[in-house]
Amino acid sequence: MSLVIPQPPQATVPVAGSPDSFPVHRIYCVGRNYAAHAREMGSDPDREPPFFFTKPADAVVFDGATLPFPSATADLHHEIELVAAIGTGGSDIPVDRALEHVWGYAVGLDMTRRDLQQVAKDTRRPWDAGKAFDRSAPISPLVPASEIGHPNTGRIWVDVNGEKRQESDLTHLIWDVAETVAHLSALFELVPGDLIYTGTPEGVAAVGAGDTLSGGVEGVGTLTITYAA
């Protein structure tokens, strides 16, 4: 059997300090996983179990990239996140075994066309136009868990043009990485290559053409992208 059109290139993420790359299967994102961010978005974090949305695998873009400003939005927001990369798949993974399935970690930005997301919320429609657009998942090189362990504390932050925008700590996650993997694996069969963007702290705000975003997660890495003027 031959393909009737050329096969699209495989989306990958670089591995820090290595010539190797990590193939991306799916991108899952956790919504409202820091209490303060949930409140700034008008929700009560004490009542809400984790929920998930997705981005296409080829939405990943790399550290240092200069990106075109996304189309169809006047309100593009930054959301800095810890990213967990799945190395061993499974379904209904128990919490106490979940971290065995994580290959490594990275720093990610869940870029959001907030105006389009709000329209979707108001009309009870899917969030895809607000969340799953081209180049909406910037990511730093992955660091293997075998080198850094499984971070559950540490500063997470993002600056825009050198001005502090978001700053928190991984200890403020409502659902930690192990719990998130367990919940997600009850909904989908996780497979090697899946990325999980684990949620963002408070302080999300708009960025514009010409802005540079620099963020990081303590013990994991840093990420910088620029939107072309």
Image: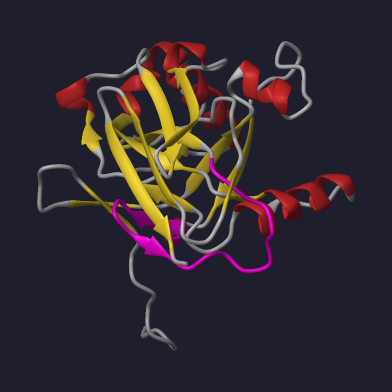
Identity of the residue drawn at 67% across and 53% down: 75
Q: Is residue 76 magenta?
A: yes
Q: In the depicted view, which residue is nearer to us: 119 or 174? A: 119
Residue 201 % position (x, y): 55, 25
Q: In the depicted view, which residue is nearer to us: 39 or 22? A: 39
Image: magenta residue range = 58-78
Horizontal arrangement in the rendering, residue 49 relative to residue 133 (left or right): right
Identity of the residue drawn at 47% across and 19% down: 168
Q: Is residue 51 magenta?
A: no
Horizontal arrangement in the rendering, residue 227 relative to residue 51 (left or right): left
Q: Residue furthest left?
A: 18
Q: In the depicted view, which residue is nearer to us: 91 or 169? A: 169
Quarter of the image where one finds residue 208: bottom right
Residue 128 % position (x, y): 67, 55
Tally of numbered discs:
0
Residue 133 % position (x, y): 58, 61
Horizontal arrangement in the rendering, residue 91 relative to residue 74 (left or right): left
Quarter of the image where one finds residue 121: top right
Which quarter shows the N terminus? bottom left
Residue 197 % position (x, y): 47, 37
Q: Is residue 2 above or below residue 86?
A: below
Q: Which residue lies furthest to the bottom in this view?
A: 4
Identity of the residue drawn at 89% across and 51% down: 123
